[in-house]
Image (spheres, rainbow, N blue to C red):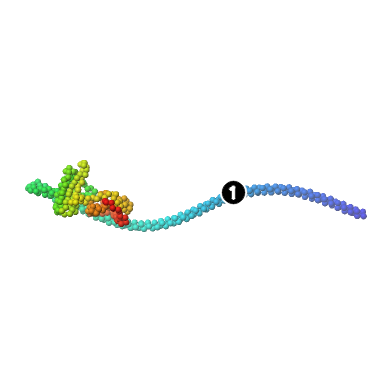
Amino acid sequence: MDAVRVQLAEVMASERALLEQRQATEAGHDRLVTLILGIGTLAAVILSLMLNGMLLRSATTEARLSREVESRNAQLEEQNLELEMQSQQLQEQATELEMQNEELQATSEALAEQATELEMQTEQLESTIRALDAETQSAEAARAAAEVANRAKSDFLATMSHELRTPLNAIAGYAQLMQLGVPEPVPPAHHEYLTRIQQSQRHLLGVINSVLNFARIEAGSVIYDMADVSIAMLLAEVEPLVAPQMQARGHDYACLPCDPTLVVRADPDKVRQVLLNLLSNAIKFTPPGGQITLSAEGLVDDPSEKFAAIRVREASGRLVWQASRLDPDHPAVQWAAASIQRTTGKMPALLPCIGASMPNDVWADMLGMPTVWVPHSYGGCSQHAPNEHGLGSLMREGLEMMGGLFWDLAECPPDTRRPP
């Protein structure tokens, strides 16, 4: 029993030692666990602090980045708006460019058409230039021929001047000798005939000088021998020159007396020729057996002015071939001027007085129609001369002007109800 007890005591002692050892081991374990827990807790705290710092820095960074992103987003939105506006502007510009392109295409087509027209006009101009060159050559040939004819005419006039003046001077000399009684006295009744022969000789010599003036007119060197001309002597000189024609037509000629002191300043030969032309017209157009009256009077009271009016009247008492004096404000004149201006683009010059002629006398005086003359020429045309000519451009303008007048006359004739 004791052995059992000893064994039990030993067992119990060993168990007690094992228990203590185990408790000591567990206590060591507990201390180790506590240490580990403390270290773990400390490490967890440190790790938590580190994580919190990292998270805080991360949150701060994210916030900053978020703000930067928001700022960039705002900038991007602004840029996007700007891009949209620029896109709209580009679209508008593209539309404008398309319109401009269409306009350029239309302009290009118009220019192409104009270029074609210009080419056609160029061809026409070249053809016209060739025609003008041909006309110029023809005109040069005609001018050369006219110069030859003019020289021949001048030579002829110079020759005839000598050939005609010589016998005329001889006639004058013999008439003067006969009046002086050389070689023997002549009857008193013949003195009047000799005086008329001398007057006719002087007139014919003046006519020859006038013929010679044609050459001077072409050269622009007409000579006027200005002098004081007695109107009374002038009227007396022309009477014997027209007396044979008056007698042949059976006219009764009367030269009314004028102031013997009436004097004008003029070329005697030319004034005499003008007066003879007026008397010749009166003799020609006055019915046989009519009466022709020649008169003269001063136009101003002051004799130093030396202006006079010489009138040739037939039996009715009216002036022979008097010049028409249509008022420039007459409707017919204004209508003609407006028509010419529309056709030519130029305002014509209006002259209130024109020369006398039979058509003018018939229209204005007998029929009571307004008379408007439309001359269209230039100073060098040599009108009524052997080498009369005209510029082609001037002739074309004249045809256009007269065509416009007749066209307007058919569409809208002038109001001529007001008496001229």
Give residue 328's position: percent from left, percent from top: 28, 49
Kindly identify the residue that appears in the image at 47 percent across and 55 percent down.
98
Q: Which of 248 and 317 is in front in this view?
A: 317
Q: Quadrant of the N terminus?
A: bottom right
Give residue 31's position: percent from left, percent from top: 79, 48
Kindly identify the residue that appears in the image at 40 percent across and 57 percent down.
113
Res 222 visible: yes
Residue 297 placement, left or right of 332: left
Assign a secondary structure to mark 1.
Answer: helix
Give residue 355's position: percent from left, percent from top: 23, 50
Crowd band around label 1 with a 10 angstrom C-alpha radius: few (<14), some (14–19), many (20+): few
User: In the rendered image, which residue does mark 1 sit on?
Assistant: 71
Where 300 sits versus 83, above or below? above
Residue 298 placement, left or right of 329: left
Amino acid of disc 1: Ser
Q: Nearer the viewer, residue 231 or 185?
A: 231
- Count of all numbered marks drawn on residues in the image: 1
As drawn, the residue found furthest toward the left would be 184
Give residue 145's position: percent from left, percent from top: 24, 55
Res 340 visible: no
